Amino acid sequence: MLPNPPAVSSSAPEAGSCIVCGERSTHVAWSENGYQSRACECGALYVSPRPAAGAIDITRDSHPDSFYALPARTKLRWLARHVGPGRLLEVGAGDGDFLAAARSFGHSTAAIEAHANRAERLRRRLGIEVECASIEESRWVDRSVDVVFHCDLLSHFADPHLALRRMTRLLRPGGCLFFEVGLMAEVAPIWYRVIGEIGLPDHRWFFSERALVRLLADCGLQIEQRVYFSLAPVHVASYVAVHVRDVLRRVRRSSSPDASPATVATPSASTDRWRRVANHLRYGFSGLARWGGPQTALFIARPAAAPSPAINRAVTAVRGN
Ligand SMILES: [Zn+2]
């Protein structure tokens, strides 16, 4: 990796307005932790007020390792249908579960990880090149990788335009961005009550697909492939589990005031078993996504001026199957 100045300009709208279109909205879709998520006409949600500089720790990750590890091969199998093995860089690689799986698919891997301890663990675990930096501050050499992957980061970037442009600069000719992002905007308001917490203010932005397309276009990117997974089953299951657990706890306490809540055996987000079930619910219902509601989706996007890629010869063989 050669030193490379992170000189990418931002065209992000001013504070207090939508990150996608720059307009302001008075429509509050959800409130949490003293922040509002405002629904914009363009199909995006934006956090209001804009978190102050330093108010959000970008190295904090509320997801357990299993959130990345369990679906890694599912995502890589889908990627392999469209893009062959190459130099794959993950932004925000965490402890490297996705990259470990990516190597088994033939990719040469590297990482940018802002958390110093995780970056060091990554180097030790995988023996790969890791830059400890945010994507905005990264000095990774331009035009050096075939695939830039990131998961659940678009809602977190202080300036998604800047982050996307910086990632695009890292691509070799024919390279692509491969990413997962939740499509949580323009859903019926009841879904936010079912979900319960949407992670404000760490989740600064939420997107509908049309808002995402516009954001990408503003960064010179176009979507080439996509697949959707309905989040309705996992959120409904979590909602039911939490409420059943609360009812059982109340019943148990009323019948035996000294009983410990921990003895009530119901599904819990803290159990490995539940996490595996949740993973199946999250990625097992792509067909339901067409009925609406919250979704997560995988996208492959490329610079708009660069048509189809040559990075992958293996694709032809895979598509032929
Ligand atoms: Zn907007």
Image (tube, helix red, strand yellow):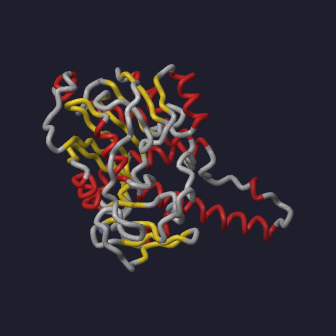
Residue 200 seen in this snapshot: no
Residue for point 50% across, 62% down = 198
Q: Residue at x 45, y 60 (%)?
A: 204
Q: Is residue 149 above or below residue 312?
A: below
Q: Nearer the viewer, residue 6 or 297?
A: 6
Image location (x, y in percent) of residue 143: 28, 30
Quarter of the rendered structure image containing ligand 1: bottom left
Q: Relative to 246, does residue 152 appear above or below in the rendering? A: above
- In-front residue for pair 31/8: 8
Percent position of residue 1, x then y: 40, 24
**Residue 209, x across and y down, in percent:** 28, 58
**Residue at horizontal 55%, vertical 32%?**
119
Q: Is residue 308 above or below residue 14?
A: above
Q: Give the image quarter of residue 13.
A: bottom left
Where in the figure is residue 301, as x and y percent of width and height? 25, 43
Quick one: quadrant of the C terminus? Answer: top left
Question: In terms of depth relative to the viewer, which is nearer, 161 or 107?
Answer: 161
Residue displayed at 65% across by 61% down: 245
The residue furthest bottom is 26
Q: Is residue 178 left or right of residue 93?
A: left
Residue 116 visible in this rendered orientation of the protein: yes
Q: Could you tell whether 158 is left or right of 252 in the image?
A: left
Relative side of 246 to 312, left or right? right
Camera-side residue of 228 and 171: 171
State left or right for residue 30 relative to residue 253.
left
Residue 252, by quadrant, is: bottom right
Count how many numbered circles sit on residues in the image.
Answer: 0
Q: Which quarter of the picture shows residue 14?
A: bottom left
Which residue sits furthest right? 258
